[in-house]
Image: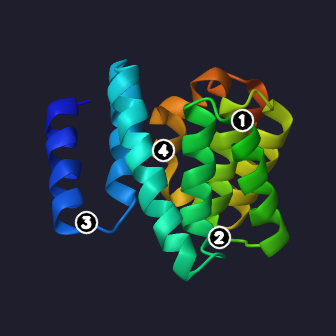
Amino acid sequence: DDYDAAVKYHKKGAIIKPYSEEPWHHLSMIFHKMGDVELSRDAGGKMVNLALRKLEVNPEDCVVLSRMALTYAVIGEKDKAFKVVKKIEEIQTDDGIVLYNCGATFTRLGKKDEALSYLNAACEKGFMNIIHWFTNDPYLESIRDDPKLQEMLSKYAH
C-alpha cells in the first residue's frame, strides 16, 4: 500500500532495464490502483511500445504478449486485447504468469467465465505461490468476491 515507494522502485527499474516492459506494466497497475488514469495510460503506452519492440525479436514471447493483452484491456483497446489473447492461445503456453495475465485481461474485458477459467489454469500450474496477487490485483477487483473465485482459491491454498 506504499504507492510512492512502489512508483519510485519501478521507475528505478525502468532506468536500470530500459528495454524491459515489466517496470512499465507494474507502474501502469500502480497508477491505476492510485486512481490516476492518465498516468496509468501513459505507463501502459510505454509498456506497449517496449513490448512491440521485443516482439519483433521473439513474436511468441507469451509473457510479453500477456502483459500487452492486459494493458490493452486496461486502456480500452478491447479488440487488440482479444487478438493478443488469441495469439497466446495459438501458441498454447502453460506458463502460470501468462495464464494469470490472461485471466486478468478477461476480467477487465468483462468476461468472467473466461477469466475464471484462465485463473484456475494458472492455479493448476502452481501459480498459487503468489496468492497475494489474487487478493491485491486491482484488475481482479470486479470478481474478487465472486463465490467461484473464492472456492477456487480455497481449493488451491496450501
Mark 2 residue crowding within 10 angstroms, few (<14) / some (14–19) / many (20+): some
In this view of the protein, can residue 152 be seen by the observer? no
Q: Nearer the viewer, residue 100 or 45?
A: 45
What amino acid is labelled 3 in the image? Pro
Within 10 angstroms of label 3, few (less than 14), some, or many (20 or more) residues? few
Gap in angstroms between the C-alphas marked 3 and 4: 25 Å
Q: Are marks 2 and 4 in contact (CB under 8 Å)?
A: no
Q: Is residue 143 above or below residue 7?
A: above
Image quadrant where residue 64 sits: bottom right
Q: Earlier in the sequence, mark 2 or mark 4?
A: 2
Where is mark 3, residue-wise?
18
Q: What residue is disc 4 on?
A: 133
- The three-letter amino acid code for the residue at tag 4 is Trp
Q: Secondary structure at mark 2?
A: loop
- Residue at horizontal 32%, vertical 42%? 27
Quadrant in which the C terminus appears: bottom right
Please, what secondary structure does the residue beneath circle 4 have?
helix
Query: How far apart in space, not on screen, are marks 4 and 1 (Cα)?
Result: 23 Å
Mark 1 and mark 2: Cα distance apart in space:
23 Å
> At 36% from the left edge and 41% from the top edge, which residue is drawn?
43
Q: What residue did someone put label 1 on?
A: 78
Which secondary structure lies at badge 1? helix
Disc 2 vs disc 4: which is toward the camera? Answer: 2
Q: Which quarter of the rendered picture does the N terminus lie within?
A: top left
